[in-house]
Image (tube, rainbow, N blue to C red):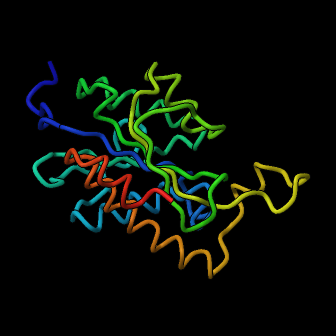
Amino acid sequence: MFGMNKPKNIDWLVVGLGNPGKKYQGTRHNAGFMAADALAERLGIKVDRVKFHALVGDGMCGEKRILLAKPQTFMNLSGQAVDEIMQFYKLPPERLLVMCDDISLEPGRLRIRRKGSHGGQNGMRNIIDMVESSDFCRIKLGIGAKPHPDYSLADWVLSHFTQAELKIMEETSLKAAEAAEMIVNGETDKAMNLFNS
């Protein structure tokens, strides 16, 4: 069906959300990319192949083989890449883990959920629409609320972290990577107890 280069079996798809390009590095909306990078480093996975409208790499996470993906479609169309990958590898929603930013949490805080709504996060909204399910795990990384009500949300999520916040986010990304590893290996409760704040 896929010719000679039929892919290896993939047990899980782990996705970090963000916007591609230098311009967006270090912005609040790219917290998911930061977490994906931390996980890639932790597991020794090179996320450098361009496929499915994403940068992807695969490797072992404990006993499971994962595909780690950073969609390159820009945030609001993240579901395009996620849906393509899930269809290709025939993965059910319960084998999907998404890491993304959350404005309702302060920088440094994590929230792990087994499923739920998009919470106003447009990448998550698009994934739910495209895969037609919200029954997948997510790790939300706090990026802080808008500084005042009149501040444009689009401007806020595309603003850069301060140096102090970046340091916090690096530590938070490491925790998110550790949590992701636990979730993939069937220890979601443990991850929630350890990291939910």
The one nearer the camera, 186 or 4, is 186
The one nearer the camera, 69 or 145, is 145
Relative to 131, residue 26 above or below: below
Q: Quadrant of the N terminus?
A: top left
Which x, y percent locates residue 69? 36, 47
Which x, y percent locates residue 169? 52, 70
Q: Residue at x 34, y 36 (%)?
A: 96
Q: Is residue 79 left or right of residue 191?
A: right
Q: Residue at x 67, y 76 (%)?
A: 162
Q: Residue at x 47, y 73 (%)?
A: 170
Which x, y percent locates residue 121? 62, 40
Q: Residue at x 12, y 31 (%)?
A: 6
Relative to 64, residue 168 above or below: below
Q: Is residue 185 left or right of residue 81?
A: left
Which x, y percent locates residue 36? 39, 57
Disc tally is 0
